[in-house]
Image: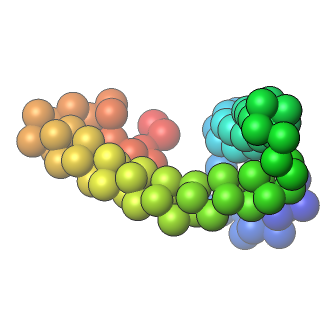
Amino acid sequence: VVKRFREPKHERRPWRIWFLDTSKQAIGMLFIHFANVYLSDLTEEDPCSLYLINFLLDATLGMLLIYIGIRAVSSIVEWQQWESLRFGEYG
């Protein structure tokens, strides 16, 4: 919320879009947290080390896969001229 208010007024996303974007991140973090707790019980490993491994994989391979996926979907959207499916276009 603090970051949102530090952005220039003309660049701020509407509240609804901001909430949807931040809730995606919160849900993802909760999923990773509970997955690490579950996996640490199964493997009897330290949950913190599992979280570090998971975070590093997400920050490297995950970002690469997301980048490739967005580029591929963006190309298909442009080719098919689907205006409502363009990334970053909120209408």
* Residue 69 seen: yes
Q: Is residue 49 left or right of residue 73?
A: right
Tell me the quadrant of the picture where the C terminus can be found: top left
Is residue 23 shown above or below 9? Answer: above
Q: How is the image coloured?
A: rainbow
* Residue 30 seen: no
The mark total stands at 0
Q: Residue at x 90, y 61 (%)?
A: 2
Q: Residue at x 74, y 61 (%)?
A: 52
Across and down, in percent, residue 76 comes to 16, 40
Furthest residue in direction right, as rendered: 2
| Residue 59 or residue 13, whichever sits in front | 59
Across and down, in percent, residue 22 comes to 73, 43
- Res. 37 image quadrant: top right
Q: Residue at x 33, y 31 (%)?
A: 84
Is residue 13 shown above or below 9? Answer: above
Q: Is residue 68 left or right of residue 16?
A: left
Across and down, in percent, residue 8 comes to 72, 69
| Residue 87 or residue 60, whichever sits in front | 60
Across and down, in percent, residue 23 comes to 74, 36
| Residue 32 or residue 46, whichever sits in front | 46
Q: Residue at x 57, y 58 (%)?
A: 57
